[in-house]
Image (cartoon, coloured by chain):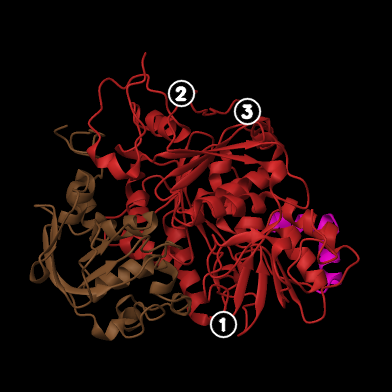
Amino acid sequence: MYMKFIGRVHIFGDNVLCDLMISGKHIMKNTSMKELIPFLMEDIDKGFAQLYKPGDIIVAGENFGCGSTRAHAVLVMKEAGVKCVVAKYFSRGFFRNGINEGITLVESNWDGIENKDIVEVDTEEGVLSVKAKGLSFTISPLPDIMKNILIEDGLINYYNKNGSIKLKNNSPRLNADE
Amino acid sequence: MKNMRKCICKDNWQNVKVRGILMSIAKTIAEKIFSIKADKPLIAGDIVVTNIDYGMTHDVNAASVIEMFNMINLPEVREPEKFSVFLDHLSPSPTTDIANMHKNIIEFAKKHNIKYFMPGRGVCHQIALENVSILPGQIAIGTDSHTCTYGCLNSLAMSVGASEMAVAFASSECWFRVPETIRVELTGKLIPPASAKDVTLELLGRLGESGAAYKCIEFGGTGLSSLSLDSKAVLANMSTEMGAKTAVMEPDEILVGYLASKGIFQPQLVYPDPEAKYCKIINVDLGKVRPMVAIPPHIDNVMPVCELEEIHVNQVVIGSCTNGRMEDFENAANILRGQRAAPGVKLIIVPASSEIYLGLITRGYLEIFINAGALVNPPGCGPCAGALGGLAADGDVVVATTNRCLKGRMGSKFAKIYIASPETAAYSAVSGKLSCEKNVGECI
């Protein structure tokens, strides 16, 4: 999924550690990601997993997902129904994991947006907005390869469809028509 | 040919219009390595899909990698000789669940002819350096945030996620955005007891924990060759704590000598071009670096050890992929020789590999550590990632040569972890207080 999202906001602050999204004690268990959904973010925001509904949108501060690059955080989010996360910016390890698992990650300023607001993310128009508050922010387009991965809902699906991840026209430039 | 490009920073990389003819644009090491791999000129901001030369996963993420791999249509590992699987973070297996997971991982590796390293062999990153799994100018990926350690071999090594490792298994390919580069210009020479870890803590203080976000940190300068390969590995390893995508060192005689000792001659070394563009240049006079410590819970909240108020410690950990090498243990052993850990201090030693463990024995360091009252873990990650090997209790104050001090990292959420060098850790074990000299209060 890539183009448009509408959802209820859950706010997080700056420097949210990937290590704390699924805490270490769960890494020790050999369980499925689905079974870990109730523990998502418990070390950061205890009630989050109970409040979160599929399609809700996490809106976070700077450096979201810093620390380890554990697969669990993003995989459990995916199972929980997270399709889009907005942050002022992402830690690069989390960014890669998110895109490759098919979660649309949007880097943008979002000052004024609050918990429980209904936010709209339109990656085609390049707009992040909360209509009820008259808030609107411009969001930059992602490079083609990331867009394509998201459209196919993750790298594995993208690879299965194309048999390769090499860019179609082999252009290294950001957008094929540049 | 005139340099047609401008410094590209993260803020405007998506809006760069200057392309022109890029044939002899001056390049950083990262831009050059990607350009050589892709066989076309690339600069920071460009997206590239390229074959990788080495890939690895370990027992925290391998199960997810395997699950993803099995979702690929008719999955086959195309070039198994490029990959390695390690059982190091959750080793030796502390529960039956983990033992069963290890068994599954080994079965997968055997089935696909991938090299696997058993529990006790050591940490993935150290073994890669010992085996020279990656050469200068090559590209490595790993499902671990400290994969950047291999930058000390003049290569580009980056952390990736489970699904991309799975796709890399099947295709040997991975996508990258060529990073901008921060240049760290080293001059002078370290004055003991200051060591490489203190240099990284100094850098963390200057850059902050996201100051190098998405970037490559390139180390060079006249002071680089005063650092051993073990010391260079520390600098490369800790770069991820500054948010860096990767880190790379300019080559020098020490690297060439090390490669020759492993039977590798005339490596394809990669130097930056003299007019390469950097987002930032940081100058570090190694002679001015003092023993430093990171105050929990933030790795970038650093200060010189001797400016601290008195802090009693009750656990000291010397080891891990950051500081578990021979040079680190040599320096620790020189401080601990004939000494005992202060009453109430748990001293934990974690050699980064079985080769290093053997070295501790032959050099007599193991005897020094055990006589000092140390608990010596088998080679592996030990308590660094909070899995096993001596976790911290509520209220514990830990001095560790590891790499992270977030709450709960090494056990209890109510323990405090101070990150420091092996020298500082060893002194602290003896005095029972966070210190850089035998007599608390003395400082360089």
Instruction: Tell me the element at label 1.
Output: loop
Question: Compared with residue B392, is residue A68 higher up or lower down, i.e. above or below?
Answer: above
Helix, strand or loop: magenta stretch: helix
Cα distance in 3D space between marks 3 and 2: 29 Å
Residue designated by label 1:
B414
The three-letter amino acid code for the residue at tag 3 is Phe
Give the chain of mark 2. B
Q: Residue at x 43, y 64 (%)?
A: B61
Q: Which tint is chain B?
A: red
Closer to the chain start, of discs 1 and 2, is 2
Do discs 3 and 2 share a chain?
A: yes
Instruction: Tell me the element at label 3.
Output: loop
Residue nearer the viewer, A61 or B355: A61
Marks 1 & 2, CB-CB < 8 Å contact? no
Rendering coords of residue B125 (x, y %): 56, 53
Numbered range of the magenta stretch: B350-373
The three-letter amino acid code for the residue at tag 2 is Glu
Q: Is residue B228 visible?
A: no
Residue nearer the viewer, B118 or B15: B15
Rendering coords of residue A150 (x, y %): 19, 55
Residue designated by label 3:
B265
The three-letter amino acid code for the residue at tag 1 is Phe
Marks 3 & 2, CB-CB < 8 Å contact? no
Which chain identifier belongs to the brown chain?
A: A
Marks 3 & 1, CB-CB < 8 Å contact? no
Q: Residue at x 52, y 75 (%)?
A: B407
Q: Residue at x 66, y 57 (%)?
A: B323
Rendering coords of residue B314 (x, y %): 72, 78
Residue designated by label 2:
B275
Closer to the chain start, of discs 3 and 1, is 3
